[in-house]
Amino acid sequence: KVKAAVFASGNGSNFEAIMKHEKLACDVVLLVCDKPGASVIEKASSYSVQTFVLNPEDFESKGKYEEEILIKLEQEGVEWIFLAGYMRIAGETLLHAYERKIMNIHPSLLPAFPGKDAIGQAFRAGVAVTGVTVHFIDEGVDTGPIIAQEQVEIFPEDTEELLKIRIQKVEHVLYPTVINSILLSDKME
Ligand code: GAR
């Protein structure tokens, strides 16, 4: 199986959904986290996934921070990167080393509502439909080629909290599914 790393900054529910998938087509060998103390770190330990926690503030530049990550990724033989609530824009060091090998999940129908708090943005905008996007990343904020999207309806009596629960439910099924289909089609190429 190919080796993959998950990058996350927060709670790690998507990390956990990936780990729980019964027939994941890769081995997640590393969690990269930029937030010391984030809940996802404990989750990784509970799945016996090695964690690599780095605080970007300890580095003089994004390039230096990413070089350190890159060394670790290469040591571990990581071929794919899945961003799962990694709240940081990848720089050219990572993008260049992992061209078309970094996927991201975002809680809106991109290009609508990029950036932070996409669920709140959609809720406040009063749209009837939002959703989830899985895409390859590029140097932009939640831009890059879209791989898959799924719609989530916003009901008149909805709350932001309920919407978030429904969106994350969709994420937890969509992300591992898309990861598998991309890895399988990559293998056939
Ligand atoms: C997820 O909803 C993910 O789509 C979002 O952060 C959340 C992380 O939750 N990502 C972004 O907004 C990226 N711009 P989790 O830590 O429970 O997986």
Image (cartoon, grey):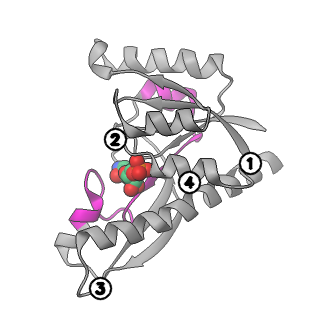
- Residue hosting label 1: 25
The residue drawn where x is 79% and y is 38% is 1
Q: Is mark 4 within 8 Å of ligand 1?
A: yes
> Quick one: label 3 or label 2, which is nearer the N terminus?
2
* Residue 20 drawn at (x, y percent): 63, 52
Please tell me whether mark 2 sits on a helix, a strand or a loop: loop
Q: Judge depth for marks 3 and 2 and give the one in front.
A: 3
Please tell me whether mark 4 sits on a helix, a strand or a loop: helix
- How many marks are shown on the rendered structure? 4
- Residue hosting label 2: 87
> Quick one: label 1 or label 4, which is nearer the N terminus?
4
> Quick one: label 3 or label 4, which is nearer the N terminus?
4
When asked about the image quadrant of residue 163, the answer is bottom left
What numbered label is drawn on residue 155? 3
Please tell me whether mark 3 sits on a helix, a strand or a loop: loop
Q: CA distance from mark 1 to mark 3?
A: 36 Å
What amino acid type is highlighted by mark number 4?
Ala
> Mark 3 touching mark 2, by CB under 8 A?
no
* Residue 106 drawn at (x, y percent): 41, 56
Please give the range of residues in magenta: 92-121
* Residue 166 drawn at (x, y percent): 40, 71
Label 4 neighbourhood size at 10 Å, few (<14), some (14-19), many (20+)? some
The residue drawn where x is 35% and y is 62% is 111
Please tell me whether mark 1 sits on a helix, a strand or a loop: loop
